[in-house]
Structure formats: structure tokens, C-alpha cells
């Protein structure tokens, strides 16, 4: 089996996230979910979510699905690094994305969500594509959609082809050769604690010299920006006149009129180049002459995150084989 589904940017002004249509239950209920390689819970806005915390999101109503089954005595609660989070109960039901169906997928129904999720009416939940060890369901952890689907896929892989301000795709079970140029470079993945963690071989700013330095970080489709070590990020923004690391705005800001240099990162003996335009993330407020950078320091996080700003410059293969590996190609 194999499938393909669109990755639709939530806000065409700036790619804060990408959502993908899925159907849950019988008869099928359609929701648009954020596919997330940086976590492993599949949770949705639901008929159980506090009404005051729902603002236009589509919801999953298990009571309207003839195939929904409550996973009695199970609950979940997740907290993301940005302080956002959600919690609730668990059902199993039919879950389909891009034509691939898992018949008894654990679907975590939210009873409560934090304000950042309430305010994002285009995101109706998340589909965790990290390793199932990160799943928060208690007392028994549940498998991700990919772990459940793996055995029925032609190949135990999924790929991300995210695009700048345009619709991209997630493919399941196959690698579409038309989506990339040159070769795919595969790297080993550290699966502990459960992220797709790999080590980049270094970086270059614009057409400057390449700095050979190992940068261990996670490939995260649901983190908008890219967070790298301070030394790397400082050497990038030093090339931009007027760029400052603003305490007030919580990161590097710069004059929107700047022409930003590209950022190249090493993957084995190959490399991926992020065009400067991808690193001009957004005006700090509508109409402001000051813009917020898409490349920020990871020093406050304790982890380096290759988020959408980096991923959308590449074709990325998440290989769930034994051992798992991650593949990068230019496109
Ligand atoms: O959680 C995810 C992926 N799901 C995000 C879902 C989500 C959370 N608000 C959302 C809002 C909209 C859509 C999806 C989400 N990735 C990881 S791995 C490690 C960290 C981390 C650990 C410690 C400290 C910091 C990060 C994060 C993290 O918190 N990223 C979000 C972020 C990272 C930095 C800054 C802001 C956000």
C-alpha cells in the first residue's frame, strides 16, 4: 500500500504550520491535522473539548462513529517546549490519510487545549510521527499512525516535501523520484528519546566558506522555525546589516528590506541550501518595517531543531526500517 496527501500552509503570509486532511471514523469525519515528526501523540479537537476552548476548529465526535471504541481507563496529557499543551481521553477508530487506512488507530480526543491551539482555527489537531516511545497515553502508550501503517506499506517510509508558501506533500510507503534532484544522502538516526535526531556535518553562510562542525538536532515538521547553536546563528545574522538579537521580541529581528544570505547545512558529504527568502519569516506585526528571523538560537531550548524553515528547502525521507535512517535531497 502507499499514499500521498497535501501539506497545506496554514497562513499563506507565513508558514507557521502545515495541515493535511484526514478522515476518522464511520461515516468518515474530515479534519485537517498538523503532521508532526517532533512528537508522537495523535490528538484532535473533539466533541469533548471545552466549548470555550474551541474557536472554529473542525471536531471529531466519537459518539457519531459506529467504529469508535473508548479505550477505557486511558488518558493523555502533553506539554510542548513552547509551553502549549493539551489533554484528554482516548478512542480507537478507523484513520485514513492519503488512501492509507489504519483500522484501530488510537485517536486522542482533547478535553482541554492551551490558548495557542484555540487561537489557531486551521489546526484541528496533530498527528505524531515521532517514535512511539514519546507517546503520552497512560497507563499504556499507543502507537503512531506510521508505526501502525508500516507493515501494510510497500516500504516502511514516509517523505516530507514541504514548500515555501505553497502546498507540498507527505507520501507514505514510497519515494517519489520526481520530487528531488541528485541523490538522497541517508544519515543514522538516534531514536532516544524518540525524535528523528541526526547529526549535520556543518554549515556555511551565503557563499562563505563551509564550517566543518557536528550539529546534532531533530527534524521537526511541526516547529515553524529552525533553532541552532548560538555560534552558528550569530555568524549568520552578523552578515545582515541592522540585525539584532532582541530580548523584547525573543530572537533575531532585522530590517524587512534586507536581502538575506542563504544558509547551507551539511548532510554527510552533501549539503542543503536554505534560500535567504525562507529566513525572512514574518513582519513582527502587520505592516512593520521590522521582520523576525527564521533562524534562531537554540541556547534556551536545550535542543537543536531543524524546523519547517530548513525542511522546506529539502526532500526528506523518514525511513522507519531497521535501523531507522533519515534521507536528505536537494530539490
Ligand atoms: O514539540 C515539538 C513538535 N510539536 C510542536 C507542536 C506545537 C506546539 N505549539 C504549536 C502551535 C501550532 C502548531 C503546532 C504546535 N517539537 C519539539 S521537540 C523539542 C521541543 C522543545 C523542547 C524544549 C524547549 C523547546 C522546544 C519541541 C517544541 O516544543 N517545538 C515547538 C516549539 C519550539 C520552539 C519554539 C516554539 C515552539
Image (cartoon, rainbow, N blue to C red):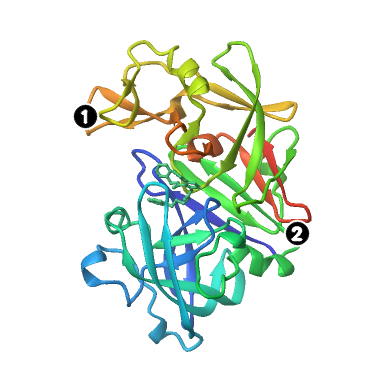
Q: Residue 196 placed where, x, y %? A: 62, 48
Residue 242: quadrant of the picture? top left
Report if residue 281 is visible in the image: yes
- Reading the image, the residue beneath label 2 is 155
Q: In this view, does 138 lie above or below 185?
A: below
Horizontal relation, residue 262 to residue 320: left or right: left
Q: Give how far across and how far down residue 42 sits, in percent.
A: 49, 65
Badge 2: few (under 14), some or many (20 or more) residues near its Cα, within 10 Å? some
Kind of element beneath mark 1: loop
Separation (CA) of disc 2 from disc 1: 47 Å
User: What residue did someone put label 1 on?
Assistant: 287
User: Do we see residue 312 in this rendering?
Assistant: no
66, 326: nearer the viewer:
326
Compared across the picture, whether 223 is left or right of 202 comes to: left
Residue 218 position within the rendered picture, expressed as x and y whole percent measured from the top left: 58, 42
Question: What residue sits 58% from the left and 38% below the top?
Answer: 217
On screen, 322 above or below 215? Answer: below
Residue 214 image point, x, y percent: 66, 27
The residue closer to the viewer here, 177 or 44, is 44
What's the residue at 62%, 11% (across, down)? 209
Amino acid at each position: 500500500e502507499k499514499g500521498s496527501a497535501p501539506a497545506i500552509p496554514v497562513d499563506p503570509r507565513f508558514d507557521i504550520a502545515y495541515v493535511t486532511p484526514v478522515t476518522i471514523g464511520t461515516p468518515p469525519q474530515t479534519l485537517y491535522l498538523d503532521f508532526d515528526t517532533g512528537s508522537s501523540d495523535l490528538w484532535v479537537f473533539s466533541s469533548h473539548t471545552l466549548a470555550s476552548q474551541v474557536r472554529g476548529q473542525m471536531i471529531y465526535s466519537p459518539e457519531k462513529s459506529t467504529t469508535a471504541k473508548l479505550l477505557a481507563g486511558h488518558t493523555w496529557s502533553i506539554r510542548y517546549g513552547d509551553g502549549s499543551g493539551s489533554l484528554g481521553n482516548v478512542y480507537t477508530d478507523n484513520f485514513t490519510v492519503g488512501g492509507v487506512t489504519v483500522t484501530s488507530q488510537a485517536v486522542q480526543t482533547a478535553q482541554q487545549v492551551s490558548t495557542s491551539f484555540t487561537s489557531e482555527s486551521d489546526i484541528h489537531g496533530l498527528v505524531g510521527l515521532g517514535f512511539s516511545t514519546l507517546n503520552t497515553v497512560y497507563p499504556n502508550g499507543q502507537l503512531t499512525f506510521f508505526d501502525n501503517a508500516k507493515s501494510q506499506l510497500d516500504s516502511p517510509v514516509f517523505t516530507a516535501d514541504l514548500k515555501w508558501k505553497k502546498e507540498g506533500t507527505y507520501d507514505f510507503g514510497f519515494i517519489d523520484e520526481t520530487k528531488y534532484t541528485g541523490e538522497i544522502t541517508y544519515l543514522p538516526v538516534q531514536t532516544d528519546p524518540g525524535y528523528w535526531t541526526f547529526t549535520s556535518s556543518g554549515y556555511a553562510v551565503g557563499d562563505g566558506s563551509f564550517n566543518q562542525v557536528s550539529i546534532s538536532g531533530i527534524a521537526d515538521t511541526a516547529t515553524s522555525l529552525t533553532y541552532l547553536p548560538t555560534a552558528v546563528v550569530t555568524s549568520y545574522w552578523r552578515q545582515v546589516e541592522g540585525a539584532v538579537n532582541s530580548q523584547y521580541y525573543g530572537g533575531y529581528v532585522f530590517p524587512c528590506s534586507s536581502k538575506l544570505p542563504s544558509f547551507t547545512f551539511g548532510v554527510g558529504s552533501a549539503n542543503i541550501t536554505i534560500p535567504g527568502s525562507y529566513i525572512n519569516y514574518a513582519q513582527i506585526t502587520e505592516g512593520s518595517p521590522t521582520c523576525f528571523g527564521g533562524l534562531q538560537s537554540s541556547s534556551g531550548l536545550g535542543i537543536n531543531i531543524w524546523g519547517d524553515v530548513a525542511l522546506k528547502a529539502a526532500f526528506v525521507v523518514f525511513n522507519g526500517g531497521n535501523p531507522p535512517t533519515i534521507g536528505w535531497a536537494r530539490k
